Amino acid sequence: MDRLFVRLQAMEQKIFIWINGRLHNRFLNFWLYYLTHLGGATFTITASLFIGFIAPEPWGSAGYMAFTALAISHIPVAAAKKLYPRIRPYLAMPETNTFRNPLSDHSFPSGHTTAIFSVTMPFMFTFPEVTILLLPVACIVGFSRIYLGLHYPSDVLAGAIIGTSVAFGTVALWP
């Protein structure tokens, strides 16, 4: 079992180095630095509540579902960060490309990825036609977290799974 874990870890580091190192260019540096904020607390809270308050039904309900999923999804994220304190890649690997003011808390799982998936999924479940727009946005935010040197691929995958699962549960149990 230890050998499998070591292999998976080595594979993950190779993927991380490829995304964070080889793909770096001025175009992606600009866009991903700004697009990553779509998964931040300010945007996700504001957008979901704004849609909930302003949009007509059924969009308003989807906005409230998104806000609810966002709030609930950060409970397992906070617990996982305490239980599995993983150092961020840019701190573990000095050659990592990163940007100004990088986060210094624990890496696993990605909170930004959790947030964007928990907020976009209720809209995708309710209005499947928006999936073509929202799924790529959510994936770009997750990708940006690796590109910016803040998360390993498994951090992002875990965030996407948590966000999607909580959003699915929220939509399924919504009154």
Image (tube, rainbow, N blue to C red):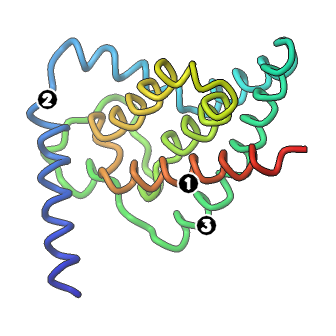
Left or right of 26, for residue 164 = right
Q: Name the residue under label 1.
A: 162
Instruction: Name the residue rendered at 31%, 30% in the picture.
Output: 99
Kind of residue sitting beneath label 2: Leu
Left or right of 162, for residue 42 = right
Choose mark 1 or mark 2, whichever is in front: 1
Q: How crowded is mark 2: few (under 14 residues within 10 Å), some or many (20 or more)?
A: few
Of the image marks 2 and 3, the number of the one nearer the N terminus: 2
Q: Is mark 3 on a helix, strand or loop?
A: helix
Q: Position of residue 119 (x, y in %)?
A: 64, 34
Kind of residue sitting beneath label 3: Ala
Q: What element carries label 2?
A: loop
Q: Is mark 1 on a helix, strand or loop?
A: helix
Label at residue 79: 3
Q: Position of residue 145 (x, y in %)?
A: 36, 38
Say above or below: 91 vs 138.
Answer: below
Q: Position of residue 109 (x, y in %)?
A: 46, 56
Q: Mark 2 points at which residue?
A: 23
